[in-house]
Image (spheres, rainbow, N blue to C red):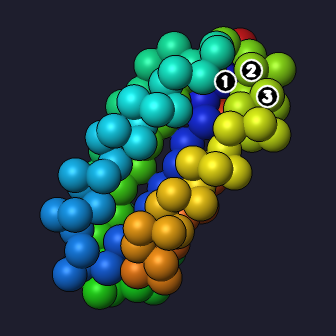
Amino acid sequence: MIIYEVNCLVDNDIVDEFRAWLKPHVDAVLKAEGFLSAEMLKLTEDDRLTARPYSTGFSVRYRVSGQSALDHYLLNLAPALRQEGIDTFGHQFTAYRRVLQEDG
């Protein structure tokens, strides 16, 4: 099992619009083969968030069946979905991603 984590730091003046956009975005990602579930969380402490005090942080953790499913998503689907966020919000947010694997 793979955890694919996407963290977004969003300018405070667009938080409501971003939150409204995020839910259908997550639903679109979950349509990718091998994506099993997602949880959306609010970041309360993060070094990058501290460096952007005018921002609110969100974290989405996707559970993915394996590395091949994640690789397929990243190569074939992620670029268009990421561009949608950029087209909608421009430079009013930043995103960074992590991939985690269950240990054991």
Rendered image: mark on residue 69: 2
Looking at the rendered image, the disc whose residue lies closer to the viewer, 1 or 2, is 2
Of the numbered discs in the image, which one, if any, rests on residue 61? none
Q: Nearer the viewer, residue 99 or 104?
A: 99
Name the element at disc 1. strand
**Which sits earlier in the primary sequence, circle 1 or circle 2?**
1
Quadrant in the picture for the C terminus: top right
In x, y percent, where is residue 88? 41, 67
Asked if disc 1 and disc 2 are in contact, CB closer than 8 Å, the reply is yes
Which image quarter: residue 73? Answer: top right
Q: Can see residue 11?
A: yes
Residue receiving disc 3: 72
Q: Which residue appears at 35% of the width and 72% of the height?
A: 10
Identified by mark 1, the residue type is Ile
Q: Quadrant of the N terminus?
A: top right
Residue that mark 1 sits on: 2
Residue at coordinates 30% horizontally, 40% vertically from top-left? Answer: 23
How far apart marks 3 and 2 lie (CA) works out to 5 Å
Is label 3 in contact with label 2 (beta carbons under 8 Å)? yes
Q: Residue at x 34, y 64 (%)?
A: 57
